[in-house]
Amino acid sequence: MFASVLREVTGYFDRRVLISTFFPVLVFLGGTVLVVWATVAGVDGAVAAWGRRPVTVQAVVIAGFLVLAAFLTFVVGNLREWQDRVCQGYWPDRLAEPFARRHRAARRCLLDRDDALRAREELLALERRTFPHHDISGPTTLTSVDDALRRLDEVRAGGEWPQGTSALLTDLARAARATPVPGFTDLVFALDERLAAAEQQVREERAEVQQELFLWYPQPPRDVLPTRMGNVVRAAELHPSVRYRLDAVVLWTRLQPLLPKEFDDAVKDAKVSVDLLLTMAAFLPLVGTPLSWWLAFRLPRIPGTPAAWLTVAAVLVCGFAVVRLVPRWWPVTVLVGVYAVVHVLVGFWTPVLRVEIGLLWTVAAFVVGYGLYRNATRAALAYTERLRTAFDLYRWKLLDELRLPLPEDLKAERAVWAEVSQFLYRGGTANPDTVHYRHPGSGDTGGAPRRRPVTRLPRRPRR
């Protein structure tokens, strides 16, 4: 009976809506009903009361419950865009500015780090050019060979590559032509490997910084949003604009129907992961907060029940959050956590303890919800990367459908996309002469209709 009713209700939704919305609604709604019923009547009493109901009543209750879940699914689905905007940081300016300022500062730190690594990379490139090769002609400026060997041995042992090391090694090579230096060849090979390792390390560190800037922050600093998810999505939205002068927000709805089915399914599946995590992140504090306080004052006792272990888990979650926010507080956090666990497990069931339980469960619900939001931000990286790929690979199909000729180079492409974006968004263009239509079969005539060939009839012979 339950399977047939569930099949009828879920037949109105596609697979992605079922995963991202319907099943979370079903789990949270059903879990709340079961917890409340088991708390009021007891587990044995709830099972016995359900068993005494006729089959018709059970079917009606199940059908009504699934209809309610389906209705809530429609509501949550219609609120999805609003939820996305809230999670992406489209807030009032007075509320958003302090958080956006913090993200701009973090982006500035990454840019400063990239500048420092670039300077280091240029320094190592200069050291590579001055590294001794076959031609080491010229006078040496060394005053002490032993001192040079000591300094070069320190570089070979590890640490940073000091500026001027290659020049010092070159001077030592010139001095070694007159007076042989023991172990000089091994020293040169070792320092060559040491310099190559330093170059590789700088390249890897700079690649990580640039990747973080590319994925996590939009390029113009004025477009930084107050949330991490908002910056991830904004960076993907500005990617076509920065590369091709193409407005992704305006042209995405035109491009999406032209995507190949396999690629379009991959984009939608990536968005399902984000929606599922955001739905759970929203439901956990919304459902968990009132349920926590109701249970804290409704349960007869906590010690010796499964609620006690749930409280222990809440203490661990809250302690983890405090340590992540203020790492130096970890000794105090451990002591407070141990006291809370002992107080809950063996303490007397007093009104003060009920308040403590309600606070612990509520804070834990918000912490876990925030953790789900952070995971949704990570999942958004895969989704936004597919959005970038869609514009990089399939934007030409949009030009074909708009009956516009393919540009010859990047400069011409940027001019075309700028005019198209402005026309679709504002209804006009700054330079209409740059847009020429090319319909199928029109050749290079710019869309002008071809003249039909004239069929000449043979002349009748004169008599």
Image (cartoon, rainbow, N blue to C red):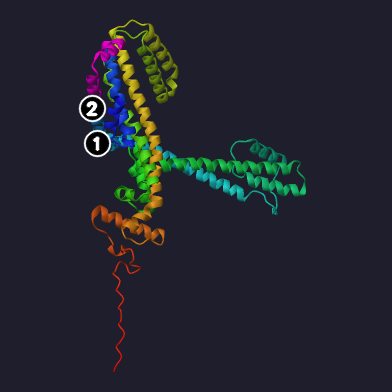
On the rendered structure, is 353 left or right of 138? left
Please provide percent x and percent y for residue 143: 70, 44
Front residue of 278 and 161: 278
Q: CA distance from mark 1 to mark 2?
A: 15 Å
Q: Quadrant of the C terminus?
A: bottom left
Stretch of the chain drawn in magenta: 40-67
**Is 409 rendered above or below residue 289?**
below
The kind of residue tagged 1 is Asn
Name the residue that disc number 2 marks: 68
Name the residue that disc number 1 marks: 78
Q: Residue at x 40, y 44 (%)?
A: 386
The kind of residue tagged 2 is Leu
Please provide percent x and percent y for residue 359: 31, 17
Was residue 351 drawn as part of the magenta stretch in this picture?
no
Q: Residue at x 24, y 22 (%)?
A: 59
**Is 243 rendered above or below residue 190?**
below
Observer able to see residue 297: no
Q: Earlier in the sequence, mark 1 or mark 2?
A: 2
Q: Residue furthest front?
A: 463
Dominant secondary structure (helix, strand or loop) of the stretch shown in magenta: helix
The secondary element bearing badge 2 is classed as helix
